[in-house]
């Protein structure tokens, strides 16, 4: 198992290649709340911490205002988050996972973070063509700054390329 405060090359490649992650937050009851998310890896924060962005897209939700989503309310009350990216295989020699302990905040589409938001929207649309018709530029998104990365198992395919869950 690797435990580091930043991502090494294998971890970063595994993360970039991954199509989804599981986000864990803490509900007001103290129970963990898990939800699958789409995300992109962005430029490192000024202090060198890796950053990820996850949209609060306009797929049907339980609430109209994305700021009222349970995961957003959880993170606004307690910004600690954990992200898990894993690869399952029936061949247990190929299992691997990356767990990121992060601090989250809400990145608004306007104001001081507008350019960063625009860059994240462009990256999300490049990674997920399904977002072409979504109004991501008008909606806030979650920004995660990685505090600690832990990994286990195989983070690359046999030919050395990264492979994610």
Image (cartoon, grey):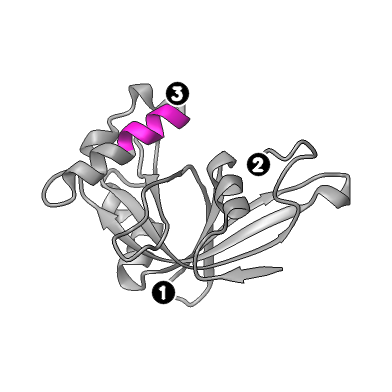
Q: Nearer the viewer, residue 152 or 80?
A: 152
Where in the figure is residue 42, as x and y percent of width and height? 38, 47
Asked if residue 59 can be seen in this view, the reply is: no
Task: Answer left or right for 80 relative to 151.
Answer: left
Which numbered disc, 3 or 1, marks the residue that appears first in the sequence? 1
Q: Which residue is mark 3?
A: 129
For the point 67% across and 41% down, which residue is it? 163
Q: Nearer the viewer, residue 63 or 111?
A: 111
Against 137, residue 50 (above or below) is below
In this view, the mark in front (2 or 3): 2
Asked if residue 104 can be seen in this view, the reply is: yes
* Residue segment shown in magenta: 121-127
Against 139, residue 105 (above or below) is below
Number of numbered labels in the structure image: 3
Q: Main secondary structure of the magenta part?
A: helix
For the point 64% across and 43% down, which residue is it? 164
Extreme-left residue of the structure? 111
């Amino acid at each position: 198992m690797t435990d580091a405060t930043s991502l090494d090359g294998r971890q970063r490649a595994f993360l970039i290649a991954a199509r989804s992650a599981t986000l864990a937050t803490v509900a007001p009851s103290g129970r963990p709340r898990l939800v699958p998310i789409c995300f992109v890896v962005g430029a490192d924060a000024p202090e060198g911490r890796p950053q990820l962005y996850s949209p609060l897209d306009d797929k049907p939700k339980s609430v109209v205002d994305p700021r009222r989503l349970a995961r957003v309310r959880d993170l606004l009350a307690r910004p600690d988050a954990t992200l898990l990216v894993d690869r399952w295989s029936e061949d247990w020699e190929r299992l691997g996972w990356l767990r990121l302990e992060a601090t989250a905040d809400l990145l608004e589409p306007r104001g001081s973070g507008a350019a960063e938001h625009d860059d994240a929207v462009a990256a999300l649309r490049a990674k997920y063509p399904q977002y072409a018709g979504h109004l991501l530029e008008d909606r806030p998104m979650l920004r995660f700054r990685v505090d600690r990365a832990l990994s286990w198992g195989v983070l690359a395919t046999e030919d050395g390329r990264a492979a994610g869950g």
